[in-house]
Amino acid sequence: MAQSGSDRRRITGPEESRAPVFDDEDSVPWRIGEPRRGRGAKDIRPIFLKAGLISQANGSAYIETQRTKIACAVYGPRQSKSSAYSENGKLNVDVKFAPFSCPVRRAPLRDAEDRSVSVLMHQALVSAVRLELFPKAVIDIFVVVIECDGLDSCIASGTVACSTALANAGIEMLGLVMSCAAISVGDDIWLDPTGEEAENAVGSVILACMPALSTVTSVRQVGSMPPATAMQAMDICQERCTDIHQVVAQALLASTKNSE
Amino acid sequence: MATVSLSKAEVAYIKTSLEATPPLRSDGRGLYDYRTIALETGVAPLANGSAHLKFGQASEQATEGTEVIAAARLEVEDVESGEGVNGGRISCTVSCSPSAYPHSSAAAIEDIQHDYTALLHEVISHPSLRPSNLSILRDLKSWLLNLDILVLSDAGNIYDALFVAAQAALWDTKVPRTRTVEYSAATSKARVALGGSGDMDVDSVEQSGFNVRDVKTAADFELEDYWDEGEPLRGGDAWPVCVTLNLYPPLYYLDATSTEEVATPSRLLVMYSFPADQPPRLQGMRLLGPSEIGLPLIKTLTQTAQTYATDLSCALRAKLKDEDLRRTEKARQRFASVR
């Protein structure tokens, strides 16, 4: 996509830009050993979730966890553009970061990091969707990250939004996929890290699972962690996913009641 | 990833033979056996460190193998104005030769190499693994280590190959020695000593740790003129190895060939690092492919992967030390005997 060079209709922003730093901002850095600021170690940020807000899509969802805001739309199942026959349906996940979503401006057309994020979301969702029911068809999921606070939790929230949107579109799934991120800081494990907190992390885990079937669909761990800590983090994530499942179920129920 | 396409019958054939007792694989290996691994370091003379790796060497049964070349190049980066960070950084790139994926389109190959790059980069260049000698001048200059891996052919188990090749190339990497250059206003005494000219002074190695102000004054650096290529990249014992468990839950097997890979779409990648005198650490984990497995199974798989990772890591260390010997002492002996 980027080969077109520059798009003349677009206002070219500066080469790079950063969020301003204000004088009165609390500048005392967090140190190892201190408790987590603002919430408990195992707490996640409150979730606002609304299904079905993009009317032209078959299904959609908007999720907001404090400073992470993601909109997600599902189109399909519709006919695949390629002529090749495929026995199973295809699931496409396309993630786009808004240029203003992160502290450092993201160029509109370049999509280097977007693909790795979409791959992770695809991995989390693909085993839940019953693709064998849609031969030759394709399901497109478009995710727009409007604001991103912590990439790991952004991926987790995005996954939750996607599965809500899939359910909203009435696509058959084996279960709703929930996802939760955790980081290891000092001896502690913190759930749903913000971008600032993630800077102190030595390792991070993103777990996606289907609480209804208690199966795991995706695990991604990076950084240095003793194996036992990583396992513990996964356990905690799975536990928290059950709580997120409640939130999603409620949001879906509310959207069906509205449409009646 | 799908370099070969298999019919349903072929997939079922591979699956049932893997599940049979005793399990059968087309090349006669056991479920937990690796193919032979050939490794050579120092293959690219222009790189700071390099390695050539082959899984499944050309033999009677296996004519094809997974072949990978890794090379590390060092570059100086500006910390103040450029992208550099204090302490240096590592950037990994994987490029796939089109001949490795003859059945894939150019766009598909691009996606594949992007995925490999993302996975390798997030594990290898994580700050927890950063070598301690990539810094040149604090707040001014640092090394950027570009680790480029070229996939020449892919006959399965590419992830393990990538990580082994990466480790070998990093092990082989020598960081050029540098010393700081600073400008100091010569005092009148020094001016006399220097004969009134020359206000450039090259600082010596022994610098007082207490003299904090002096650290800042270093303005530039120069390369030391020395007989060898530099000191080895530190942190060489912490580079992780990757073990790919190909899953037919609860059954799993190691080192899949490309046909087996197509028949087994789901796999668990576990990266372990074994730093000296420390307990093993998990450096990465990834579940790939359409798979739903329970968390307890993931835990047992991760634990069993540790034993395979230990074996692989020990063998690799031994081979790398052997390679070092081959290129230094044995080469010297051979040279001496010829003379």
Image (cartoon, coloured by chain):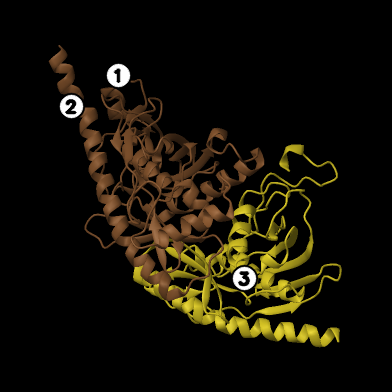
Chain colours: A yellow, B brown
Residue hosting label 1: B195
Left/right of residue B40 with respect to residue B110 in the rendered view: left
Query: Dot 1, how many residues are within 10 Å of its Cα: few (below 14), some (14-19), or many (20+)?
Result: few
Closer to the camera in the image, A78 or B220: A78
Is the C-beta separation of discs 2 and 3 under 8 Å?
no
Q: Please, which chain is the residue tagged with disc 1 on? A: B
- Residue at 48% x, 44% y is B91
Q: Please, which chain is the residue tagged with disc 2 on? A: B
Q: Please, which chain is the residue tagged with disc 3 on? A: A
Residue hosting label 2: B330
- Residue at 36% x, 58% y is B23
- Residue at 26% x, 40% y is B320
Q: Where residue A235 appears, x then y in whole percent?
A: 45, 77
Position of residue B74 relative to residue B158, above or below, is above
Looking at the rendered structure, which numbered label has been put on residue A128?
A: 3
Q: Where residue B68 appears, x then y in whole percent?
A: 43, 37
Q: Where residue B124 appears, x then y in whole percent?
A: 43, 50
Whether residue B264 can be seen here: no
Quadrant occupied by the N terminus of chain A: top right
The amino acid pointed to by label 2 is Lys
Whether residue B201 can be seen here: yes
Left/right of residue A201 with respect to residue A149 in the rendered view: left
Closer to the camera in the image, B309 or B133: B309
* Residue A224 location, quadrant: bottom left
- Residue at 33% x, 54% y is B30
Q: CA distance from mark 2 to mark 1?
A: 50 Å
